Image (cartoon, rainbow, N blue to C red):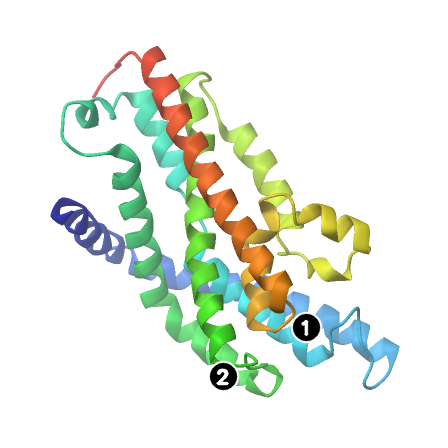
């Protein structure tokens, strides 16, 4: 276990050498968020004072997008899938086949260190932005909801990573995985709730999405925080989220085992 803590420590140090890049990314990441909030403000203003879209007041809608930004900062996979695919193509994984270290856990440690370093840098501009909009920010309904939100965020991070890892395993069979990654990202962006809250969709479509992994990559933890998921619905959602984490992990492991049989070292 100590070796993986060492990987996390080294990963944080390496990532902090790019802290200015992280800061710029965090600042420019607020630009589309501001544009989306202005868009929704126009929509609510056109509907009249006190209007609602779906089950959301304007304050709740602003809170939703602020929370998606926070959850995304904590859980998003940035370049890990590209780096894993490059390691496979360049033969860099050969060293892990000869050492007592699991490549999946090695990459997971680097993913966690990257998220920790990014949040350390992005926390200040993001915190200032949320402070400026604090009158719109909705607090969770209670401590239990906050605790379950944090549990769901951890599961979201694991789900994001394992899906990306499994996609990167395609590099064992194809030379270029970018097309597959972009297609998956397009589905995730819409079906995970980045673009809009999923519960403003038609009920049948919304329910169907809950049986895919996409809502659990962003929308579900935010809905817990906001009290939109509660009671039996919340427990069912957490169990489904855990199921998808385990399923993604199993697929990642299976893809690695099958890929190693085909692998032939080239280069490093």
The residue sitting at the right extreme is 47
Mark 1 and mark 2 lie on one chain; the one further toward the N terminus is 1
Q: Nearer the viewer, residue 235 or 255?
A: 235
Q: Is residue 161 above or below residue 154?
A: above
Task: Tell me which residue sits at (57%, 36%) in the image.
Answer: 182
Q: Is residue 84 above or below residue 263?
A: below
Picture disc at residue 131 = 2
Left/right placement of residue 222 relative to residue 22 reads right
Task: Tell me which residue sits at (17%, 25%) in the image.
Answer: 95
Task: Tell me which residue sits at (62%, 63%) in the image.
Answer: 232
Q: Is residue 121 visible?
A: yes
For label 1, the residue is 61
Q: Residues within 10 Å of mark 2 (few under 14, many from 20)?
A: few
Residue 17 image point, x, y percent: 23, 55
Secondary structure at numbered mark 2: helix
Residue 62 figure quarter: bottom right
Residue 214 image point, x, y percent: 60, 47
Instruction: Say which of marks 1 and 2 sits in front.
Output: 1
Residue 139 figure quarter: bottom right
Left/right placement of residue 40 relative to residue 13 reads right
Q: Is residue 28 visible?
A: no
Residue 9 image point, x, y percent: 18, 54
Q: Is residue 183 above or below residue 61?
A: above
Q: Nearer the viewer, residue 121 or 3?
A: 3
Picture disc at residue 37 = none
Left/right placement of residue 78 relative to residue 15 reads right
Q: How many marks?
A: 2
Q: Residues within 10 Å of mark 1 (few under 14, many from 20)?
A: many
Secondary structure at numbered mark 1: helix
Task: Tell me which residue sits at (67%, 56%) in the image.
Answer: 195
Residue 238 image point, x, y percent: 53, 56
């Amino acid at each position: 276990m100590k070796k993986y803590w060492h990987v996390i420590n080294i990963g944080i140090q390496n990532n902090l050498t790019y802290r200015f890049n992280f800061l710029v990314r965090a600042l420019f990441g607020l630009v589309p968020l501001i544009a989306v909030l202005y868009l929704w403000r126009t929509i609510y203003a056109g509907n009249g004072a006190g209007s609602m879209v779906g089950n959301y007041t304007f304050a709740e809608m602003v809170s939703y997008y602020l929370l998606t930004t926070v959850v995304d900062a904590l859980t998003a996979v940035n370049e890990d899938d590209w780096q894993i695919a490059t390691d496979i193509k360049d033969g860099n994984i050969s060293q892990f086949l000869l050492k007592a270290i699991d490549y999946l856990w090695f990459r997971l440690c680097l993913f966690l260190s990257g998220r920790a370093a990014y949040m350390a840098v992005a926390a200040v501009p993001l915190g200032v932005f949320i402070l400026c909009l604090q009158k719109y920010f909705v607090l969770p309904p209670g401590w239990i909801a906050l605790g379950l939100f944090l549990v769901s965020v951890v599961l979201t991070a694991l789900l994001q990573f394992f899906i990306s890892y499994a996609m990167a395993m395609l590099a064992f069979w194809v030379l270029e995985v970018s097309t597959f990654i972009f297609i998956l990202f397009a589905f995730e962006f819409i079906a995970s709730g980045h673009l809009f809250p999923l519960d403003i969709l038609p009920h049948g479509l919304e329910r169907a999405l809950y049986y895919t992994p996409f809502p659990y990559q962003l929308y579900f933890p935010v809905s817990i925080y906001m009290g939109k998921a509660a009671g039996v619905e919340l427990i069912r959602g957490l169990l489904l989220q855990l199921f998808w984490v385990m399923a993604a992990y199993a697929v990642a492991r299976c893809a690695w085992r099958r890929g190693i049989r085909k692998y032939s070292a080239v280069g490093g």
